[in-house]
Image (tube, rainbow, N blue to C red):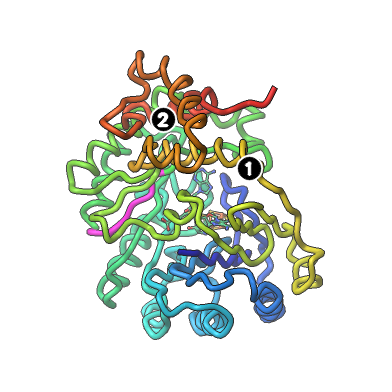
């Protein structure tokens, strides 16, 4: 199993909270597509014989590109790698880009999963976040996509937005459920330094939600979605049935090989992580050469720590046999020794062969997980 990620680094405007790599100039679209094609050629040997199961267009804002251009990239990928078994091709879409015409064109491509950045169904929040759409537009975009026959739709929501009450958050989650989408991602707002929110928080003009409110909102979401039949398969992700778990996300969390194309994209091949330059101009100039990449070789200890971190955030948890198969009996013993104190205070539970963090403790999982890491003296 392997995954292909293609970064589309364009946004019409910058949202106040977002520090993902993007440029607000779309003037270089054609140059960019050609650069991506050069990079694809350059990395044609990357997957070896492994078939690619999932493709993800993320951003930035992939829905700023005409669907025919996205399909051109899919065709290029098909000409270089084995995509015969590909079952999930996702595009991230901003609600304000979605028109009947856009959806008609999208329906003619191989894309079969749409991930809408809704964030909130409250116009006051959307304004604060700096989104270009209102709640009504988000609802209409999703209904229009459903009417066109897209049967695998995901939406992103954000909780911990300053000023959002528990009742308002409850309504947001309920509205997402009632829309009948197949997948919901609920992220806790992160305030990063190089964003408008970062500056506002520093100046004292934005008061971040407290940890207690974020934990309560997380649990409200968990209760509503699990009561509505969603399975909570990773800390931020819920699927309405097994078949709607995101294969792409799952590939990352299981440590499968993935290739990331475009500026700021990262790749992982089981041994090393490769980071591409996060500058559009440099990328366009140098794509197709080795000069855009930074590399990090993962030691056995890095791999152990990553495995613990990702496995504990999924519903799969840590299986004793899988852990000892990967890291030997010593790895298992080390984990069980560190997990002991968390088992006693209920922050980790053991069910037969499996260790998990119970859902109500997942929001404090960062502090638990870092205590389980193997730190070299
Ligand atoms: C990188 S964005 C790209 C998707 C698309 N451009 C959009 O805005 O809908 C993917 C998702 O990450 C989440 N996200 C981005 N910045 C975040 C932040 N600071 N805190 C929490 N979630 C964030 C949002 O839910 C967003 O929909
Ligand atoms: C925050 S997630 C949202 C996924 C969505 N909730 C879903 O289930 O489809 C997606 C974002 O992660 C980032 N991303 C994913 N894979 C990446 C990679 N290999 N390299 C760089 N960024 C990546 C991109 O910014 C992308 O917009
Ligand atoms: S949230 Fe999406 S639209 Fe907003 S700046 Fe980030 S990538 Fe662009």
Residue at (57% x, 37% y) in the render: 191
Decide which of 217, 33 is in the foreground and name it: 33
Local packing at callout 1 (Cα closer than 10 Å; few below 14, some 14-19, many 20+) is many
> Which of disc 1 and disc 2 is earlier in sequence?
1
Q: Is residue 273 magenta?
A: no
Q: Where residue 197 appears, x then y in whole percent?
A: 59, 39
Residue tagged by mark 2? 363
Residue at (59% x, 67% y) in the render: 8
Q: Is residue 88 visible?
A: yes
Q: Is residue 36 left or right of residue 100?
A: right
Q: Which residues are magenta?
A: 180-186
From this view, report whether residue 286 is shown above or below residue 278.
below
Decide which of 46, 191 is in the foreground and name it: 46
Q: Is residue 184 magenta?
A: yes
- Whole-number angstrom distance, CA of label 2 to CA of label 1: 25 Å
Residue at (25% x, 74% y) in the render: 147
In the rendering, which numbered label is found on residue 196?
1
Q: Where residue 47 appears, x then y in whole percent?
A: 58, 69
Cβ atoms at labels 2 and 1 below 8 Å apart: no
Q: Where residue 68 appears, x then y in whole percent?
A: 51, 84
Residue found at the far front of this picture: 329
From this view, report whether residue 178 is shown above or below residue 345.
below
């Amino acid at each position: 199993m392997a995954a292909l990620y293609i970064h589309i680094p364009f946004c019409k405007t910058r949202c106040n909270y977002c520090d993902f790599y993007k440029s607000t100039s779309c003037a270089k679209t054609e140059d960019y597509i050609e650069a991506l094609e050069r990079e694809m050629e350059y990395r044609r040997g990357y997957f070896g014989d492994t078939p690619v199961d999932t493709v993800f267009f993320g951003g930035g804002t992939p829905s700023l590109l005409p669907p025919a251009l996205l399909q051109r990239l899919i065709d290029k990928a098909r000409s270089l790698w084995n995509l015969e078994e590909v079952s999930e091709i996702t595009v991230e879409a901003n609600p304000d880009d979605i028109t009947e015409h856009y959806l008609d064109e999208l329906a003619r491509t191989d894309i079969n999963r749409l991930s809408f950045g809704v964030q909130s169904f409250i116009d006051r929040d959307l304004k604060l976040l700096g989104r270009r759409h209102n709640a009504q537009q988000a609802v209409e975009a999703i209904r229009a996509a459903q009417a066109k026959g897209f049967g695998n739709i995901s939406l992103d929501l954000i909780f911990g937005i300053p000023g959002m009450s528990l009742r308002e958050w409850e309504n947001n989650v309920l509205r997402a459920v009632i829309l009948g989408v197949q997948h919901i991602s609920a992220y806790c707002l992160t305030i990063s330094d190089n964003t408008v929110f970062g500056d506002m928080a520093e100046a004292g003009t934005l008061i971040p939600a407290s940890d207690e409110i974020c934990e309560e909102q997380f649990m409200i979401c968990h209760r509503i979605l699990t009561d509505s039949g969603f399975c909570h398969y990773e800390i931020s992700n819920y699927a309405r049935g097994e078949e709607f778990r995101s294969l792409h996300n799952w590939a990352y969390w299981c440590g499968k090989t993935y290739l990331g194309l475009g500026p700021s994209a990262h790749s992982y091949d089981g041994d090393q992580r490769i980071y591409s330059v996060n500058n559009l101009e440099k990328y366009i100039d140098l794509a197709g050469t080795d000069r855009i990449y930074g590399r990090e070789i993962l030691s056995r200890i890095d791999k152990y720590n990553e495995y613990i971190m990702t496995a504990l955030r999924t519903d799969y948890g840590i299986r004793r046999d899988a852990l000892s198969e990967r890291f030997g009996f010593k790895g298992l013993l080390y984990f069980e020794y560190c997990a002991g104190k968390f088992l006693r205070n209920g922050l980790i539970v053991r069910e037969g062969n499996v260790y998990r963090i119970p859902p109500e403790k997942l929001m404090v999982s960062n502090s638990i997980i870092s205590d389980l890491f193997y730190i070299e003296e």
